[in-house]
Image (cartoon, rainbow, N blue to C red):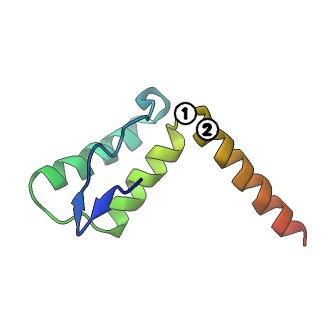
Amino acid sequence: MKIVENGKLVGDPMKGVDLDRLTSSQKAEVLRVIEKAADGKRVGMDDLKVLVKARRTGASDPLDQAQRSMNSALERLRALR
């Protein structure tokens, strides 16, 4: 899913995210990024990292959770080599 294009937010970056799973500081950071975009300011790489981290933390879709579990298992296997 594309979140940022040409420095602007595309669609709803928090769609499918369980906001209750985010910490209060993560919620504040996400709100800061969304307000920044709403003011017409350019969304940078650091802002994108905030959104991606929040999406991973708050993923409520079981498919997303399974993907994260598989990725972490693959990382552990690579570390064993």
Residue lying at 40% horizontally and 43% vertically, measured from the top left: 26
Q: Which amino acid, mark 1?
A: Asp
Residue on which the image places disc 2: 63
Report the side of 73 relative to 9 (left or right).
right
Observer-nearest residue: 11 or 75?
11
Q: Kindly give the residue lying farthest to the right in the view shown.
A: 81
x, y (%) of residue 47?
Answer: 32, 60
Q: Secondary structure at mark 2?
A: helix
Q: Quadrant of the C terminus?
A: bottom right
x, y (%) of residue 35?
Answer: 17, 48
Residue lying at 18% horizontally and 54% vertically, measured from the top left: 37
Residue 32 vertical position relative to residue 23 in the rendered view, above or below: below
Decide: few, some or many residues near mark 2? Use Cα within 10 Å; few <14, some 14-19, many ≥20: few
x, y (%) of residue 34?
Answer: 23, 48
Q: Which amino acid, mark 2?
A: Leu
Query: How many numbered marks appear?
Result: 2
Residue 67 vertical position relative to residue 21 in the rendered view, above or below: below
Residue 80 vertical position relative to residue 53 in the rendered view, above or below: below
Q: Kindly give the residue lying farthest to the left in the view shown.
A: 39
Report the side of 5 relative to 21 (left or right).
left
- Tag on residue 49? none
Residue lying at 23% horizontally and 67% vertically, measured from the top left: 7
Q: Kindly give the residue lying farthest to the bottom in the view shown.
A: 81
Report the side of 39 relative to 26 (left or right).
left
Observer-nearest residue: 63 or 48?
63
User: Which of the 4 quarters of the picture holds residue 41?
Assistant: bottom left
- Tag on residue 61? 1
Q: Cα distance, mark 2 to mark 1?
A: 5 Å
x, y (%) of residue 9?
Answer: 24, 55
Q: Secondary structure at mark 1?
A: loop
Decide: few, some or many residues near mark 1? Use Cα within 10 Å; few <14, some 14-19, many ≥20: few
Q: Are marks 2 and 1 in contact (CB under 8 Å)?
A: yes
